[in-house]
Every structure is written in structure tokens, then in C-alpha cells.
Image (tube, coloured by chain):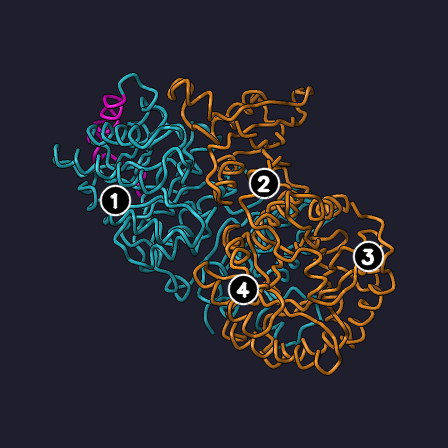
Chain colours: A cyan, B orange
């Protein structure tokens, strides 16, 4: 019999609801979803989720950590169904967190994973092993296409490895997708030709699912090195379809609408979601919320995403962790040293608010070069 | 200038983080996402989210309710971008809940809404106005295709209005989608022909986005009356695309992976998500978690979903609220009377665990007929 998937849940305390019965309820909800006795004994034995482990500490008022096994026969080779079993109706329950999942080889082999991974993204931008990478963002929304192209030119001149669209740049009339991609790509290519640089541009292709392939093709045709996609908005399988298509483009997964936080007592834990599930779905770079920024994510949670993004995962290559969300230019060296060279730091606002954007971006790029090989947080 | 969208957020208390600065941070995060001063004054004036209202009670330790206005120019006519602005990066923050949204006519007109709505679903199953409707589910996963067809036949014979696939029936080898749809449709059609009944079958078409149109077409070709789709898994725009296609099929939206609960202090409030956003995306029936079932949803939250699903929403017809999730057969009359006739009650386990499934289902159907016109919870 194939090894089952094991899901780890954290149960926060709910007065009057014993952990053990909640564990059984989750195991049933996520599988048979009928009361005991309504399914045949054969089906109960083969397909009911099995609570295989729980923390010894089941005191009232303390959280419990439980493990449930799900049989292979429940899955159908899609990420949609994987999420449906791991985090389906249970997402409607209170005080439950999906904190980990043990994914057997048969499951890992169902998904394409990162096409480029860390080595491929390094090759794309010409960054030797041991050097951390720098990304910056085209924003704010409101800039016209020529203004975005000019900003991209400035960032390319500074030597930024990856220029990405802000996830807020969709297909608004102010700077429509196709015009934006054409103009920004041309500006970056021109600057690269001038400088001999290898800056890559990743436009945001997040859109209704049936429009994504056309946007990816437009990005490819314009010579972009990759794309930005928000799997929380599109669904994981939409990102997987982009990876599956094998366009040669890198995929940067962005967390908008992901409903995750290391401080949350419900949802999917960020490191599992971003470092494992997004990567299975083809993310070469996983954007998360860095500590000390605009969000209250602790540094340990960031390091957990880093570890997961780089950890072994079947045949799949590691993905670049992309700390983001309010990193200060003066602190980049700190983060590079803490997180290690296999990090793609995304710094937007702190560069864009500078009087001299090019000089500010160049300072970040120089810090990345200066710390090459000095990482301390490698797995 | 077009009327902006107004989003209502609840901020739970966070020690040391004043409500007012958190409100400003959300308004900036969801729009410009650059520090004050990094955008031009024109862009700040036109596109920065505006905190237009807040509860007077901003005491430390108490929650605050704030309203932020988002300019029309931020949107691009897609539900993906609507969610990106209303609930994008803010979904990564702690203690924030999107509790309401005021959607102007220009936005409502961007979306197709329910194609059938309550009147169309009534016509589909031949239910006169004033009679509540009954749905039951094909489950558990593990039943073979012939077993599912037999169960469907039993439920049709009992006079159930809508037979739906459990959302756990995906495309597993045990009962593959195409075989299941063909066999169950044939069984229901045969039973209808025999009895003169109008039972409709809604298979679950939740799948990776590029596979959904093929599944919907298979359902249509097999003579199904509608489909089940989980927008939390597929993304809202995937459901909207199904509605847009105008196949004539009803859409029943199911909440798997929706990360919502009336008790949660983060996420999107269930009534807004299910009663408004799903409906905009084309849901004719919105499945939610009924009180006194397997989940701890209070009855007031259920009534809020009911109200929203039936409330005026531009040109869009009302959708059937579908209370579900552990309703007891002996209580159906209570729910029909409380929720009123424009309700489609989904009762699965309590029927399926009966020794005589057909008799149990018939009892529910008879209760629906008995209370016709007796509703007390109409808007």
C-alpha cells in the first residue's frame, strides 16, 4: 500500500471541545464526511483519515499537535485536490492550523516543481554561486507606461538582478499589461545592451485563469526572464499550469490574498505554504514578508520559509526565498549575512523613496556583492 | 469622478499598535505600497486608499471598525483584482477582518452574477415560489460509479430537488469524473422519466482551471442541471468564467478552502464572501455552514448569509442560500421555518446514515412541502 500523506495540525484550545474529538472530527470531515456507520466498513478502513499521533499534553487550555494520515486513493494528481484534502472544510473550523505535511515521493512526482530553481535563476541573471541576489519593484500603481519604463531603466542601470511588477499592477487603464510589458522589456533590454548587464524583468501575470497563458506568452515574446503570479488569487494549479507549459520563464510567487501569518492560529503555516506547496506548484522564487518590515512576522518564521524553500523536496530544485515587505536599504547587509547567499532580497519602497533612486539601488547591489559567500543561514 | 469602493475592516486590538496608524497602513498597503513621499502628490491624491471613517471607540483593547475608500482606477474589471485590492497583502496582517464592502453600480456591472438565481433554479427543478428546496449529497468518497448511481437513483426517487457530488469527489480512480457524470446523470434521468420528477444532478467540477471548461461541458452534455465548484480552491474568476460561458447550468458554490468563519478575527466575513462575492462571480446557490451542525457557526451568521444572498445587488438576481454541514433530518422543519422558503437545504449524512435512505430523504422532502409559504426570515 502506498505511503499515506501525513498532515500536522495545531489545535488551539476551545472550551468544552476536547482535542481528541476535534482530531477525529477533522479526520472524518476531510475524508468521508459522513457520520460513523454511514459508510461501509471497507470504506472506513481504507479511506477515513487516521489520527496517528497527538501531543501527550492534552490539558485544557493548551494547544495540541495532531497528525492525520490521508490515503493515496483520496488524491487525483492535482494540487487542487491536495489542498481540498489537507485544508478543505477544515478551513472553516476555528482554532485549527495546518502546520506541516509529510508528502511521499509518489505525490511529489505528480508535480513539476520549479523549472529553474536557484541554479536556473542564477544562470538567468548571470549571478555566480555564493552571491545573493537583489530585486526591486515597479510601483506605485499610478505610474504611466513611460514612467514605469524609465524607472525600470534606472533600476537596471543600478545592476538590480530582477525587476518585478508590483502585484498591484494588474491590467488597469493607467498602464495596461501588454503596453507595460512591451515598454518595460524594451527599456531593460536596451539598458542591458548598453551596460552588458543581465537584469531580468518579471511582469505580473496574475489574472483570471483563462487569461494567464496569453499574458505569459506576451512576457515570453517580449523577452522577459520571468513572471510574477499570486497563487492565493489564482489557485495553485494555475501557477502549476504555467510551470508545466515549460516556457523557460522563471516564476516568482507573491503572497497577496494568501491568508497566512506565523502569528495566526488558523490557516496554513507560511513555511509549508510558501516553501513547499508553492514550490511544488512551480515557484522558482517565493516572496514572503520579512521581519522588521511592514508586517509583524518574527525572524524565526522567515528563516523557516528560507529552510523550506531550499530543503530537499523529491527531485525538485530549491527555490529562492524572497524576503520583502518594507526592507530598509541600510539593513540589507544584515539580512544577506543572516539569510545567506541563496536569497533574493526584494527591496522596493526604501529604494524608491530615495532622492537618487539609482544610487540607492546601486548601494543594495553593492552590498550583495560585498557579502558574497558570507552566508550563515544555509541549510 | 466615479464612486469609490468602500471596504469595511475590523481591527482587533494589538498592543502597541494604535488603530489609527494600522488603518493608514492598510490603506497604503492595498494601494500605493510605497512610503509617504515616494509617490507624486497627484498619485497620492488620486490612488492612495482613504480612511474615511472609524468607530469613535478607539480604546486600547477594544476592536475598531474602519472604512477605506478605493478609487475606481485601481480595478481592472476582474474579480482577481477586486480581491487583490480588498483583501491582498492585508491578508498577511494579524487581527484584520474584511467585514463588508460597498460595491458601486459600475463595479457590479463588470460581473455576470447568477445566470439562474433563485427563479431559475426553481424553474430547473419545477418548484413553485414559496416552497423551500431540498438537496442531498453523493458520498462518501470510496463509493464506485455504480454505487453512486444507485444512491442517486434512491435520492431521486425520494423527490430530492438537487443531488450534488460531495466536494470530496474529484477525479480519483475510484469513481473518475467522466464515468461518474455519465452514470449518475443517466440514473437520475431514468428515475425522473419513471416518476415525472424533476431532480437535478450537480457534479463537482472543481479542478485545475484549464480542466474546468471540459468538465462543465461534460456535465452539460450529460444533461446535468448544474455543477458544484469550490471558488476557494479555483479562484473566484474561474467560477465567473463558468457563469460567463452561459451554458444554462446552475452553479452551486461550495466553501472548501475558503478560510472563513464568523468567529474568526482575520479573513473575509462569511456573509460578504458567500452572499456577495460568490454571487457576483456567478453562484446561483451558496453553500455555507449551518448552525448546530459539525461547525461552530452561530445562527445569526447563517441568517446574515441568507440575507446577503437574497439582497438586492445591482441587476443580479438573488441566489439560494444553502445551509449545510451536519443538519439533522429531525430538524429540517425548524430550519425551513426559520430561514424561509427561498432556502435550499443540503442534508447529507443524516439521510445517508438512515437504515432506509429513501424514506429518510422523502421525510425531508415532505417537510419542505409541508412548510411551503411559512417562511419568517425573508428580507
**Mark seen at residue A363:** none
For marks 1 and 3, give the CA distance. 57 Å
Mark closer to the chain start, 3 or 2? 2
For marks 3 and 2, give the CA distance. 29 Å
From which residue to which does the magenta span run? Answer: A357-379
Question: Badge 4 local density, few (<14 within 10 Å), some, or many (20+)?
Answer: many
> Can you see residue A337?
no
Q: Cβ–Cβ below 8 Å for labels 4 and 1?
A: no
Q: Which residue is mark 1?
A: A224
Residue drawn at the location 73% of the way across and 53% of the way down: B290
Instruction: Report if residue B23 lies within the magenta region.
Output: no
Instruction: Report if residue A372 lies within the magenta region.
Output: yes
Residue drawn at the location 76% of the way across and 46% of the way down: B303
Q: Which residue is mark 3?
A: B336
Give a yes or no on whether discs 1 and 3 share a subunit.
Answer: no
Residue at disc 4, secondary structure: loop
Amino acid at each position: 500500500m502506498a505511503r499515506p500523506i501525513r498532515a500536522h495540525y495545531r489545535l488551539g484550545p476551545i472550551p468544552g471541545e476536547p482535542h481528541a474529538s476535534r482530531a477525529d472530527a477533522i479526520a472524518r470531515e476531510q475524508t468521508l464526511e459522513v457520520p460513523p456507520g454511514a459508510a461501509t466498513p471497507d470504506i472506513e478502513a481504507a479511506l477515513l483519515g487516521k489520527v496517528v499521533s497527538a501531543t501527550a499534553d492534552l490539558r485544557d487550555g493548551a494547544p495540541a499537535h495532531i497528525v492525520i494520515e490521508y490515503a493515496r486513493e483520496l488524491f487525483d494528481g492535482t494540487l487542487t485536490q491536495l489542498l481540498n484534502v489537507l485544508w478543505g472544510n477544515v478551513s472553516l473550523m476555528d482554532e485549527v492550523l495546518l502546520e506541516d505535511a509529510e508528502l511521499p515521493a509518489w505525490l511529489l512526482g505528480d508535480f513539476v516543481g520549479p523549472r529553474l530553481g536557484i541554479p536556473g535563476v542564477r544562470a538567468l541573471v548571470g549571478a555566480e554561486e555564493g552571491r545573493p541576489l537583489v530585486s526591486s519593484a515597479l510601483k506605485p500603481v499610478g505610474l504611466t507606461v513611460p514612467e514605469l519604463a524609465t524607472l525600470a531603466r534606472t533600476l537596471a542601470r543600478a545592476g538590480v538582478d530582477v525587476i518585478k511588477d508590483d502585484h498591484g499592477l494588474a491590467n488597469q487603464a493607467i498602464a495596461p499589461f501588454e503596453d507595460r510589458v512591451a515598454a518595460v522589456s524594451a527599456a531593460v533590454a536596451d539598458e542591458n545592451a548598453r551596460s552588458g548587464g543581465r537584469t531580468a524583468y518579471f511582469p505580473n501575470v496574475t489574472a483570471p485563469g483563462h487569461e494567464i497563458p496569453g499574458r505569459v506568452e506576451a512576457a515570453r515574446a517580449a523577452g522577459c526572464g520571468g513572471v510574477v503570479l499570486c497563487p492565493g488569487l489564482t489557485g495553485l494549479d494555475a501557477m502549476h499550469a504555467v510551470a508545466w507549459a515549460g516556457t523557460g520563464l522563471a516564476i516568482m510567487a507573491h503572497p497577496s490574498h494568501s491568508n497566512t501569518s506565523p502569528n495566526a492560529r488558523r490557516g496554513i503555516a507560511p513555511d509549508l505554504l510558501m516553501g513547499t506547496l508553492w514550490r511544488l506548484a512551480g515557484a522558482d522564487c517565493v516572496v514572503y514578508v520579512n521581519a522588521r518590515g511592514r508586517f509583524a512576522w518574527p525572524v524565526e518564521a522567515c528563516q523557516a520559509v528560507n529552510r523550506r524553500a531550499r530543503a530537499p523536496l523529491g527531485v525538485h530544485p530549491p527555490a529562492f526565498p524572497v524576503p520583502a515587505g518594507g526592507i530598509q536599504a541600510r539593513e540589507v547587509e544584515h539580512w544577506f549575512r543572516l539569510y545567506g547567499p541563496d536569497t533574493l532580497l526584494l527591496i522596493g519602497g526604501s529604494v524608491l523613496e530615495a532622492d537618487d533612486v539609482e544610487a540607492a539601488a546601486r548601494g543594495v547591489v553593492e552590498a550583495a556583492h560585498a557579502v558574497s559567500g558570507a552566508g550563515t543561514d544555509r541549510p
